């Protein structure tokens, strides 16, 4: 009963840990999406600011649209040389804004694929950890159960051995009838002792196998937990990489 309660408690704790980890991943992902949207908005704002400057320089709406699309043809206006210099500067600013936006979209698309792959691996590893932890507890119980059975069989074997010694004494000192009866019990006890020894031998083999399985599960769990930590670090690193990339493009 206690083992069952402990098992349920372990399941609940592991499930709670899984939910917390999943929630944390969703928060990091939401922050990354917000950052990408902010970068796209900033690029759009930059283009709007550029259009406003062109409008102030007496460009028509059609010319501004053509300019933003790269199809602008030179036109003589007042202070042409100064205007051309300003237009070149604004054109460079627009190209930089476009390049930043394209790089951001491309990077975010690649980042989303890598991020989703990391989350998938993270969840799979978390599931593996839960399963391995439960198997570890089950193997521990199996080892304890086999050990208890072997001890019980050993005690029974010792008792049968003592009874056999007493029967042999009776057979040697009693009447012929008692001797024959004792001999009959002795054969029965010998058969029971033989079966008991075979049973103990089989239990010892099962116990050895369970101990080997237990060691394997412990090793697999340790490796799984190490992979889990690496994935967690990769996700945090990927998020930091995105933030740094955004900061560099904004400089």
Image: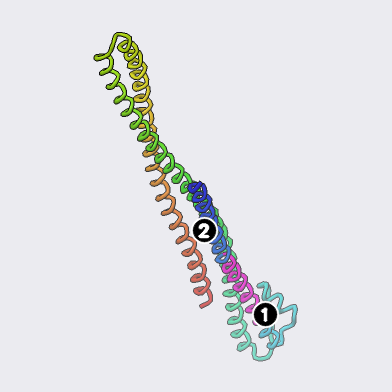
**How many marks overall?**
2
At x 61% / y 78%, what residue is drawn? 91
Q: Position of residue 173 (x, y in %)?
A: 24, 15
Direction top: furthest residue = 176
Image position, residue 20 (x, y; %): 54, 61
Q: Is residue 168 left or right of residue 112?
A: left
Magenta run includes residue 43: yes
Question: Callout 2 environment at 10 Å: few (<14), some (14 to 19), or many (20+)?
Answer: some
Residue designated by label 2: 17
- 185 or 6, which lies in front? 185
Q: Is residue 135 above or below residue 194?
A: below
- Between 99 and 150, the one lying in front of the other is 150
* Residue 68 visible from this viewpoint: yes
On whether residue 98 falls in the magenta region, the answer is no
Q: Is residue 88 left or right of residue 221?
A: right
Q: Main secondary structure of the magenta part?
A: helix
Q: Which residue reaches farthest front?
A: 175
- Quarter of the rendering containing residue 31: bottom right
User: How far across and down, in percent of the image, does residue 73 sit?
Assistant: 68, 77
**Callout 1: helix, strand or loop?**
helix
Decide: few, some or many residues near mark 1? Use Cα within 10 Å; few <14, some 14-19, many ≥20. Answer: some
Region of the chain picked out in magenta, as a range:
29-49
Pinpoint residue 39: horizontal percent, then vertical percent: 59, 73
In the image: residue 40, left or right of residue 145: right
Answer whether residue 117 is visible to the viewer in this image. no
- Mark 1 or 2, nearer chain start: 2
Work out whether 244 lies above or below 53. above
User: What is the CA distance from the residue labelled 1 to the residue labelled 2?
Assistant: 47 Å
Mark 1 sits on what residue? 48
């Amino acid at each position: 009963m206690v083992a069952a309660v402990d098992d349920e408690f372990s399941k609940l704790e592991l499930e709670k840990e899984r939910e917390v980890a999943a929630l944390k991943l969703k928060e990091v992902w939401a922050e990354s999406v917000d950052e990408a949207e902010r970068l796209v908005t900033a690029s759009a704002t930059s283009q709007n600011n550029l259009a406003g400057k062109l409008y102030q320089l007496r460009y028509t709406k059609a010319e501004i649209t053509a300019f933003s699309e790269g199809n602008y043809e030179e036109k003589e206006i007042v202070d042409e040389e100064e205007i051309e210099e300003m237009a070149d500067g604004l054109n460079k600013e627009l190209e930089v804004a476009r390049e930043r936006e394209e790089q951001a979209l491309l990077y975010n698309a690649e980042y989303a694929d890598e991020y989703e792959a990391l989350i998938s691996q993270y969840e799979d590893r978390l599931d593996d950890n839960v399963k391995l932890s439960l198997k570890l507890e089950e193997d521990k119980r199996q080892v304890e159960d086999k050990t208890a059975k072997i001890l019980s069989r050993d005690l029974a074997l010792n008792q049968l051995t003592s009874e056999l010694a007493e029967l042999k004494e009776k057979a040697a000192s009693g009447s012929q009838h008692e001797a024959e009866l004792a001999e009959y019990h002795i054969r029965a006890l010998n058969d029971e002792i033989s079966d008991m020894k075979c049973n103990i031998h089989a239990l010892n083999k099962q116990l050895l196998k369970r101990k080997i399985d237990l060691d394997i599960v412990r090793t697999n769990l340790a490796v799984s937990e190490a992979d889990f930590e690496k994935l967690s670090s990769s996700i945090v690193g990927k998020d930091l990489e995105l933030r740094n990339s955004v900061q560099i493009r904004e400089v």
